[in-house]
Amino acid sequence: MEILISVGLIALGVVLTVIGSNILVDGASTIAKKFNISDLIIGLTIVAFGTSSPELAVNIMASMSGKTDIAIGNILGSNIFNVFIILGIAAVIYPVRVQSASVWIEIPMSLLAALVVGVMANDVFFDGSLITGNTIVKNVITRTDGMILLGFFAVFMYYTVYASRNTKEDLKDDLSREMHEELKEKPLMTTGRATLFIIGGLVFLYFGSDWLVKGAITIAKLGGLSDAIIGLTIIAAGTSVPELATSAAAAYKKNSDIAIGNVVGSNIFNVFFILGLSASISPLPFSSPTALIDILMTIFSSVMMFTFVLAGRGRMISRSEGVILITIYIGYVSYLISTVA
């Protein structure tokens, strides 16, 4: 009975976080437009934030609850899921073409984010063991590391806004244009209603993330699974629902830039902002026995993206390569499950 309640909490938590992120974006976009903030800036900031807000809400809740393995697993798992499953499914639906800027800037930035986490989470290799209070922690992302990650995020956001403002009209970005059209199609609501949407979205995100974390913790205890594995699989997949829906719909409409831009942007946002903020709230020790494998898989996912784009014809991720990505993820999850069998 307890496991059914926990599964229900997880399902309800996913629904609430997805609904909360959507209405939060709608309300925030309306307020921003009323202050004459451009559609482009709204798309690059509020809309991008909205699709990653479930991960943010879950990580803040997990960090405040001291469940650092869930916070770490959620981010690494989401980034792995984004590439291997979301991008893989998008490519199977319709081959994903990649613009030059994504090839040489965004994808390498995603790889850089994964490499930075790899360095920060291997203190034993670089510095030896660390002592936190009375406990010896071998590998940990400290508050200082978190602030450094937030600094990377600030630089990336500055680049994004600066580059978008200086892009010529004949080189319009499909991702931005699609966001513009969606925002323009929605009639502006009143300021009062927009404020209620923002408050309601935050409330939904709070309760949704709280129930998602609590349900996952209970299942982990009942099933003998670690918090890290639950974070890497169930929570990561659940919080990635907005990205999955967006990329699958974009692939179906043959809007390739949205499909890959959503994945890459989310991965950068997850590491530099969400993981950075989580570590700033509470240091994140890497205590999971699969931690190194998880980090290597995160790095490998970005390498695979870069390789497929450069090796394929016309900077494209083909359907067969999409199948390869999905197959790799299935093998990875099978390995995680085998570690507790």
Image: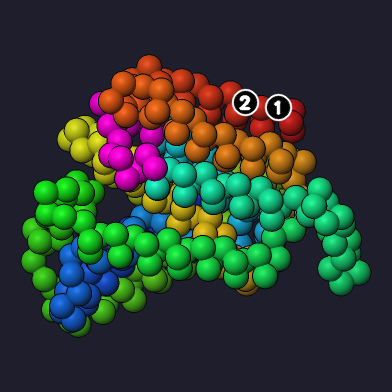
- Which span is picked out in magenta? 87-104
Which residue is more in the foreground, 52 or 114? 114
**Three-letter residue code for mark 1:** Ser
User: Cβ–Cβ below 8 Å for labels 1 and 2?
Assistant: yes
Counting from the top left corner in percent of width and height, residue 97 is at: 27, 32
The structure residue drawn at horizontal position 32% and vertical position 45%, both measured from the top left corner, is 101
**Looking at the rendering, which quadrant does residue 20 occupy?**
bottom left
Counting from the top left corner in percent of width and height, residue 57 is at: 49, 63
The verdict on residue 93 being magenta is: yes
**Residue 102 is at least partly visible in this image:** yes
Locate the C terminus by quadrant.
Answer: top right
- Dot 2 falls on a residue whose secondary structure is helix
The structure residue drawn at horizontal position 34% and vertical position 76%, both measured from the top left corner, is 199
Counting from the top left corner in percent of width and height, residue 318 is at: 33, 22
Q: Residue furthest top?
A: 320
Residue 334 - label:
2
Q: Main secondary structure of the magenta part?
A: helix
Determine whether, in the image, residue 68 is placed left or right of residue 129: left
Q: Is residue 134 above or below residue 256?
A: below
Q: How many marks?
A: 2
Residue 235 - label:
none
Which residue is more in the foreground, 307 or 52? 307
The verdict on residue 11 being magenta is: no
**Looking at the rendering, which quadrant does residue 99 occupy?**
top left
What colour scheme was applied to this rendering of the protein?
Answer: rainbow
**Residue 209 is at least partly visible in this image:** no
How many residues crowd mark 1 within 10 Å: few (<14), some (14–19), many (20+)? few
Q: Which residue is mark 1?
A: 338
Determine whether, in the image, residue 29 is placed left or right of residue 21: left
Which residue is more in the foreground, 232 or 209? 232
Counting from the top left corner in percent of width and height, residue 227 is at: 68, 49
